[in-house]
Image (spheres, rainbow, N blue to C red):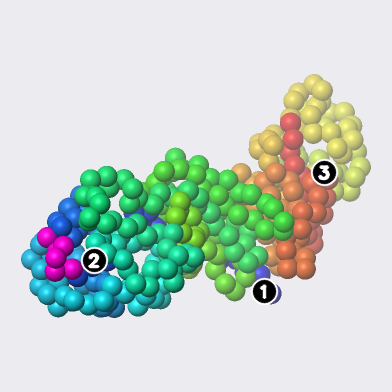
Amino acid sequence: MQKRIKDIYFNVNFSSSVTIILEPSEEKWDKIYGNCLSFIMNLPGRVNKIYFLGNKREYQIFIPQDFEMNGTGWFRENIKRPCLIGGILENLLNEGGRGMIVVIFSKEIIDIKDWENSEIFERMVFVNVNEEKLTNFQRFENPVEKIYIRGKGFFPLVYKMKPENIKSFVEYRDGEFTIKINGNLENLEGHLKVICSDENPKLFIKRSKGSPEEIILKDENPWFNNPEWISIPEDLIEVINAGIMKKEYRCPICGKNHRYDRLLCPEGGSILKGFPHNKTILIKRKEYLPLSDWIAFPLKNNERVITDEGIIYDWKDGRWERKKMIDLYEEVDDEIWGIFHRI
């Protein structure tokens, strides 16, 4: 499987749509109409269409007045149809949505038992107008419980979420990486630079009811600047070369010889002045690259990754394998060495 670096993004709204299914009962129409209108008025913009039992045709709702003006006429088109729901649910399944479904009825739905063990049944709420009147609209909410990003060969190199105060973290488990996102959100936007296979990673939204919704992340133009290699100061070139060759060097602070693995001078503090602490630093010829803003950096034609914490992962047998924590001045790719500048 080819490993590629891609820039991808997503922008989602977490308010879930609601579909209403009505029984075309002549005897109970006033109650069914009243409950439906109350629902639409109390959750503006959430109801996008309604159906009538026994008819697979959908009637679109853009504003509450659409139902006020047309609802009775739509009812007359469907009066005396049988109380069958299967064709409607098949339509909704084919659309692939994950919204809530409210059924307002007065008598038994003939084929509902055929759907009791299905995923779509978990997202259905039934309102019997003989027994109740719609007042508590919170019961029709389907809150988000989990948000995460995952994909084949997925490895996040750097990403940014909006709103910026959103909490997220990267988890490694069983050869796979996942970005987990926490928070009670209305909208979420994300931009990522990742390693992945030919298939883009997906954003998964798991609500309290129903199976997770899957959204394929879209390609975009580069959002992040590539990290810049910085020239190593002249007085540190000998220090770096000694580390690569595993020999002593003359300290630029005290003038005494130190072992290659000494990064603190007893007389003057950090020897690699200007290098960030507690971060991975890559070295190539007379330049260095600190992983200050990126989570990880790709190596070996994207078959290896080193993280900002100094951990190496190799792509092997279709999974990311945690290899090791780098040694000081370890060659991590051809003519590229790494250190974790721990102070």
- 232 over 203 or under it: above or below: above
Please, which residue is most extreme toward the left here?
69
Please give the label number shown on residue 110: none
In three-dimensional space, the C-alpha distance between marks 3 and 2, rounded to whole angstroms, equals 69 Å
Q: Which residue is mark 1?
A: 2
Q: Residues within 10 Å of mark 2 (few under 14, many from 20)?
A: many
Instruction: Name the mark nearer the viewer: 1 or 2.
Output: 2
Q: Is residue 87 above or below residue 260?
A: below
Say left or right for 50 vs 327: left
Marks 1 and 3 sit apart, C-alpha to C-alpha, by: 31 Å
What span is colored magenta in the figure? 25-30
Image coordinates for residue 151, horizontal then vertical, percent = 59, 64
At numbered mark 1, what does the secondary structure look like: helix, strand or loop?
Answer: loop
| Location of mark 2 (residue) | 22
Q: Can you identify the residue that label 3 sits on?
A: 328
The amino acid marked with disc number 2 is Leu
